[in-house]
Image (spheres, rainbow, N blue to C red):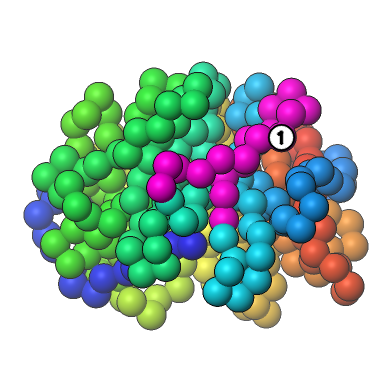
Amino acid sequence: MPICRKTLFTTTVALISIVSLSAVLSAQDGSPSGKCGFQKLTINSPAGTTASPTTLNDNGAMVGFLGSGSGPEFTVKGFLLSGGRFTSFRFPGSRDTFAWDINNNGVIVGSFDTTLSSGQRAFMVHSGGFTEVKIPGFPNAPASARGVNDFGHITGQFNGNGSSLGFLLRNGRLTILSFPGAKGGTFPVSINNQDVVVGTYHLTDDDIDRGFMWKNGVFTNITPPGAGSTQPAKVNNLGDIAGTFIDSNITAHGFALDHGRFSTIDPPGSVSTRIVALNKFDNILGVFTTSSANVLFKGFCSSLF
């Protein structure tokens, strides 16, 4: 559940430079689906709930959110699946809690809200201890923490000065991430141990999703061949990136990007595919659609990376 996007764009952030990968990183594997192994993923959540995974770490622990109820009574909890044990949780006092990422030390980040109209807030939890993550200089701003690395650096998005801006928190210090010209907002979703951040941006409020990578002040476009819109999901600690792109036929495909090479990830028999997670072993999580159902899957794609 995204937080509200604002239309006003601020220029308070100095950006070092921007380069484009879309022209030079255009190689595509000729037979990508045959190079991944796929398995249906079944998450045994409590009866009456639906589990939607959002990531997995290098230890195989998985987090996501757990929906229950319907209509106005629909609520969401975070969940952790680790070592075969399923645990759900809420930020104390929250109505809905969304878990977005977990690092290799077991630190989970996400967002919560207290009412349907209260706006989301960012949080971090480790060993059962919850902490609200506040943006320095914007203590009351709606925010969502989307990624955390093994050093505890957190990235995500917040509404500041009337704009939807990205943030990077390193040891309590704030770096604002705003793709040049992105008047519709910048939305980071993942960070690795080298502080490489990936996400999406919008040039206008009505713009398509456009993928980006940020490192040391430099923004880079991520555009798979044939993509109409691009939604990077994760960057792992080897620098590999996985996500989803939408083609000209409005069909979703998974993609991988490694050392300048794009590959498509589509399980056999899928009508469309969305990738949500990636770890350093090139294990992926996603959802593919057949003619009759949506299917959670996990895959191992080392030969693609």
User: Residue at horizontal 20%, vertical 37%?
Assistant: 174
Could you say where residue 258 lies in the image, as x and y percent from the top left?
59, 38
Q: Which residue is at the front of the view, 220 or 8? A: 8
Queried whether the magenta region covers residue 184, the answer comes back as no
Queried whether the magenta region covers residue 92, the answer comes back as yes
Q: Amino acid at mark 1?
A: Phe
Relative height, residue 7 to residue 61 (above, below): below
Q: Which residue is at the front of the view, 86 or 293? A: 86
Instruction: Name the image quarter holding residue 69.
Output: bottom right
Instruction: Name the image quarter holding residue 175.
Output: top left
User: Residue at horizontal 49%, vertical 33%?
Assistant: 108
Q: Which residue is at the front of the view, 123 or 62? A: 123
Instruction: Name the image quarter holding residue 305.
Output: top right
Relative height, residue 303 to residue 26 (above, below): above
Q: Which residue is mark 1?
A: 86
The reply to whether residue 266 is visible in this rendering is: no
Q: Is residue 16 left or right of residue 193?
A: left
Could you say where residue 5 lies in the image, as x and y percent from the top left?
32, 69
The reply to whether residue 284 is visible in this rendering is: yes
| Count of picture labels | 1
Region rendered in magenta: 76-93
Could you say where residue 216 lies in the image, as x and y percent from the top left?
28, 34
User: Residue at horizontal 65%, vertical 71%?
Assistant: 70
Relative height, residue 9 to residue 285 (above, below): below
Could you say where residue 293 lies in the image, as x and y percent from the top left?
85, 68
Residue at disc 1, secondary structure: strand
Q: Is residue 248 left or right of residue 136?
A: right
Q: Is residue 245 left or right of residue 24?
A: right
- Which is the main secondary structure of the residues drawn in magenta? strand
Q: Residues within 10 Å of mark 1 (few under 14, many from 20)?
A: some
User: Residue at horizontal 66%, vertical 47%?
Assistant: 53
